[in-house]
């Protein structure tokens, strides 16, 4: 029999969660600070939602941390640049706005993307379309079983003319790197990507070399063909900020694509709309997007729910919570807002967290997927209701 826990956690927007967590009143701030509707709160049925554990109280935010109801000029410029980039890539992969926005979000955050889908769905075209839409360096690595780590990061060789050793950089030294069919390479070669994906630097023969900025790895793999492939270990899966798929186009989109049957390489038809310096500048703008304490609380509860779910063996780490917060800021700025709302978290939770959990054997055997469990957790964890 479950025991009711008296949770008196004081948060910041007067929202009440299903475990009767009462959120404290926000002090009066500047006129540009939106007020939250403290009376119109949504309390889900307690019999359907498990009681959340008691949480320690925290101080209320200071008045200087108020939200901006009107977007600043920097946020408006971010929204325009984000939409221009998405629209440009949409001419390469037609009718797939959501996965395109997710890839652009990873670029803005500075993370990496794993595209997993059936052959012929446009994974490589999406990666090349993103690369051709930005005026920066791009390299493609075709992973094969005989690929060596030195083929990825580079090699030190002896120059006989100058009588000295010289480091020859590999294809990983590019701002945008396409790792095509990454699961075909051996684990030794796959592990060569670990340091560069996390640390964004490469160490060869004791010497550390920094990769150019911005830097993003877009890896692809086919889920249906497992013969002669090597599944990515959980440690490397956690390095990817987002895992997504493209899927087949709709009927109408397929007909439109056939009307352009003579276009053999759609990625070559786009021109750059942003530069590498623009991406760095947009990242700085996104770092100013406001994240309220109630949003942080919501993200933590979602991540903790993955650790206590009966059908999940290994839940998400704190890296997943940080990734979800950073992506939510980009999603908010792309929508023209200087603050994060719960829907930003909901829209990105599956793509950011699903590949970071490990299912129990029973769940995997009966066909349950990680995406299904994350969606279930989003239904179970009460989202704060914020009034305009």
Image: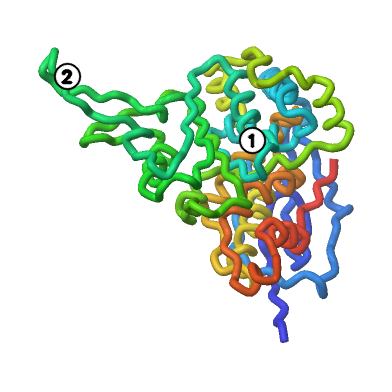
Give how far apart the Cα atoms at labels 1 and 2 are. Answer: 39 Å
Q: Residue at x 27, y 30 (%)?
A: 155
Tell me, yes or no, whether the two marked residues, 1 and 2, touch with CB atoms within 8 Å.
Answer: no
Please say if 197 is above or below 166: below
Give the position of the N terminus as an image quadrant.
bottom right
User: x, y percentage for residue 342?
Assistant: 74, 47
Q: In the depicted view, which residue is nearer to us: 240 or 297?
A: 240
Q: Residue at x 36, y 28 (%)?
A: 170
- In the rendered image, which residue does mark 1 sit on? 123
Disc 2 element: strand
Residue 130 locus on image (x, y percent)? 62, 25
Tell me the quarter of the picture where residue 172 sits. top left
Q: Would you place residue 141 above or below residue 231 in this image? A: above
What residue is rendered at 68% in x and 33% in y?
Answer: 122
In the rendered view, does 101 fall on the left or right side of 274?
A: right
**Toward the viewer: 122 or 47?**
122
Checking the image for residue 159, the label placed there is 2
In this orientation, does residue 387 appear?
yes
Q: Residue 360: image x %, image y %?
A: 59, 71
N-term-proximal mark, 1 vs 2: 1
Q: Residues within 10 Å of mark 1 (few under 14, many from 20)?
A: many
Left or right of 94 on screen, residue 125: left
- Quarter of the figure with the C terminus: top right
Residue 260, above or below 4: above
Residue 194: in sight, yes or no?
no
Residue 90: name its quadrant. top right
List the single residue furthest toward the bottom: 1
Q: Where 184 falls versus 34 (above or below)?
A: below
Residue drawn where x is 74% and y is 37% of the image: 98
- Indicate the secondary structure of the residue bearing disc 1: helix
């Amino acid at each position: 029999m479950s025991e009711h826990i008296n949770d008196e956690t004081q948060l910041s927007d007067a929202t009440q969660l299903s475990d009767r967590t009462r959120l404290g009143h926000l002090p009066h701030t500047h006129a540009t600070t939106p007020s939250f509707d403290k009376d119109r709160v949504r309390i889900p049925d307690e019999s359907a939602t498990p009681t959340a554990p008691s949480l320690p109280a925290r101080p209320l935010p200071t008045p200087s941390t108020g939200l901006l109801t009107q977007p600043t000029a920097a946020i408006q410029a971010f929204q325009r640049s984000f939409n221009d980039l998405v629209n440009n890539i949409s001419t390469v992969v037609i009718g797939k706005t959501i996965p395109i926005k997710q890839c652009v979000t990873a670029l803005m955050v500075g993370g990496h993307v794993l595209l997993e889908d059936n052959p012929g769905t446009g994974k490589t075209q999406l990666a090349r379309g993103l690369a051709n839409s930005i005026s920066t360096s791009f390299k493609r690595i075709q992973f094969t079983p005989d690929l060596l780590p030195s083929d990825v990061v580079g090699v030190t060789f002896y120059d006989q003319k100058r009588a000295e050793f010289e480091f020859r950089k590999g294809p990983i030294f590019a701002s945008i790197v396409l790792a095509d069919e990454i699961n075909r390479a051996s684990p030794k070669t796959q592990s060569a990507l670990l340091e560069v994906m996390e640390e964004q630097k490469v160490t060869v023969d004791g010497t550390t070399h920094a990769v150019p900025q911005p830097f993003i790895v877009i890896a692809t793999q086919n889920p249906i063909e497992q013969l002669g492939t090597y599944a990515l270990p959980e440690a490397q899966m956690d390095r990817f900020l987002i895992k997504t798929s493209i899927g087949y186009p709709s009927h109408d989109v397929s007909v439109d694509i056939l009307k352009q049957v003579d276009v053999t390489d759609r990625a070559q038809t786009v021109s750059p709309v942003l530069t590498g310096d623009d991406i760095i500048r947009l990242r700085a703008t996104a770092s100013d997007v406001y994240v309220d304490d109630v949003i942080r609380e919501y993200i933590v509860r979602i991540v903790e729910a993955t650790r206590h779910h009966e059908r999940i063996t290994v839940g998400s780490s704190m890296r997943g919570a940080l990734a979800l917060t950073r992506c939510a800021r980009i999603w908010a700025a792309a929508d023209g807002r200087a603050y994060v709302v719960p829907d930003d978290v909901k829209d990105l939770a599956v793509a950011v967290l699903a590949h970071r959990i490990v299912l129990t054997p029973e769940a995997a055997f009966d066909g349950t997927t990680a995406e299904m469990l994350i969606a279930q957790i989003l239904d179970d964890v009460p989202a704060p209701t914020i009034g305009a």
